[in-house]
Amino acid sequence: MSTTLETPSPVTAAEPVAAPALPPLHLGRHTIDTPVVLAPMAGITNAPFRALCREHGAGVFVSEMVTSRALVERSSESLRLVQHEPGASPRSVQLYGVDPATVGAAVTLLVSEGLADHVDLNFGCPVAKVTRRGGGAALPWKTSLFAAVVRAAVRAADAASDADGVPVTVKMRTGVDPEHLTYLDAGRAAQDEGAAAVALHGRTAAQYYAGQADWSAIAALKEAVTSVPVLGNGDIFSADDALAMVAATGCDGVVVGRGCLGRPWLFADLAAAFSGSDARVRPGLDVVAQTLSRHAHLLVEHHGDETKGCRDIRKHVAWYLKGYAVGGGLRAALGLVESLAQLDDLLGRLDLDEPYPGEGAEGSRGRTSSTPRVHLPAGWLDDREPPAPGTEAGAMLARAELSISGG
Ligand SMILES: Cc1cc2nc3c(=O)[nH]c(=O)nc-3n(C[C@H](O)[C@H](O)[C@H](O)COP(=O)(O)O)c2cc1C
């Protein structure tokens, strides 16, 4: 099969219809005509994947999360994470941090060195190694610390950028668990501290990725936060889901994560839907195979190492092939691919005439059911003040900026 690095032309259907579903999204100085954001996903939304998604659609495409401290220390991995695909605009980087000074320093570095035109702050990470130190989704519980981190980021962005500024946005979950919801306080605080938008994943940390996202929380946040855009996130697996979320919540834009795994063309569907068209991409297996190959080539180029690039593409194989009639042996071999030549040889053995399989290729994908216990520093939920430096929880928090990844 062809290993061309051009984007394959997808199969589309239907005609443009009505008026745009939403007006453009304003993120500080950026006007985003299609109010759609590719959710930051650690291990997924690197420059190659963002490039693929951007080629299909439009919107904001956010990097994998980078730890503020690692960035300030200029670790080679964090500098690789903040690379952007050529021509990307805006260049959006997600930062994770718990210490206002370190987050501020990381934003200064990103903006003064021209590495980002938009910074997103991660307050939604539910993974144990993050929350057990008070970071991620645990942090908004400590109201003054949350406000201080957002304030530090906004001030640093303002100080380091030209007059147009670099917007800082906040991404969060609804809370730690149903008894400890944080999103309304956090949303208002973020707005007051100068965040340019707030995005809400409608799950608590305790829910992880299980069950359904609570879109009514997004509607409630939209009521509470009135001066900056509110973006809704959670369980958008199709363009129609995105329109349904907008209708149900009144949100100003949508953030899409797992729905585009193995389907960068979902961004074409989203662009169509938000411009009032019901055209949808329904790729046959030939287009899927070409896109998978192209993704792998881009990863190899990005990593500068064929083995690393091929190991990286393995996790995407099952998502790309979801719903298509591909035998177990071939799937397994693709999931263990070691070289581009081997990948293209295996892809060439697919039945490239297979048409779009319909529903089987749609619906949920990626993380779904597991709900591990939320780990928090001892006594974290007892009050909403940040832990004092001399305490055990304070020491934990100080260690919370060690290199981590996840969402
Ligand atoms: C593999 C994976 C990695 C993620 N990494 C991050 C991350 O680094 N930062 C973040 O804010 N959220 C992260 N998330 C959460 C997503 O951004 C998003 O909020 C979540 O998947 C819900 O949206 P969805 O239902 O559209 O997938 C991650 C999710 C997945 C599945």
Image (cartoon, rainbow, N blue to C red):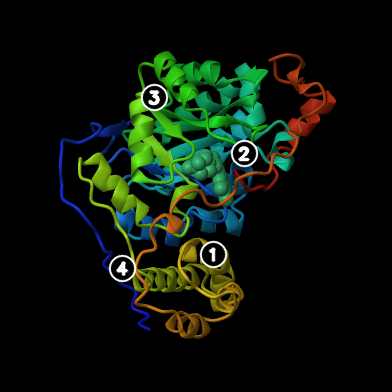
Which of disc 4 and disc 3 is earlier in sequence?
4
Mark 2 or mark 4, which is nearer to you? 2
Which of disc 3 and disc 2 is earlier in sequence?
2
Which of disc 1 and disc 3 is earlier in sequence?
3
**Location of residue 79 with respect to 27 vertically, above or below:** below
Which of disc 2 and disc 1 is earlier in sequence?
2
Name the residue at 54% across, 21% down.
183
| Residue 156 in view here | no
Q: Quadrant of residue 101?
A: top right
On residue 7, the disc is: 4
Name the residue at 37% across, 60% down.
52
* C-alpha gap between disc 1 and disc 2: 20 Å
Q: Quadrant of residue 111?
A: top left
On residue 318, the disc is: 1
* C-alpha gap between disc 3 and disc 1: 32 Å
Q: Is mark 1 within 8 Å of ligand 1?
A: no
Which of disc 4 and disc 1 is earlier in sequence?
4
| Residue 122 in view here | yes
Instruction: Sort mark 2 into few (<14), some (14-19) or many (20+) by Cα contacts within 10 Å.
Output: some
Q: Which residue is mark 3?
A: 249
Residue type of the residue flagged with mark 3: Thr
Left or right: where does residue 140 sit relative to residue 391? left
Residue type of the residue flagged with mark 4: Thr
**Location of residue 347 with respect to 262 vertically, above or below:** below
Residue type of the residue flagged with mark 2: Ala
Does dot 2 land on a helix, a strand or a loop?
loop
Ligand 1 lies in quarter: top right
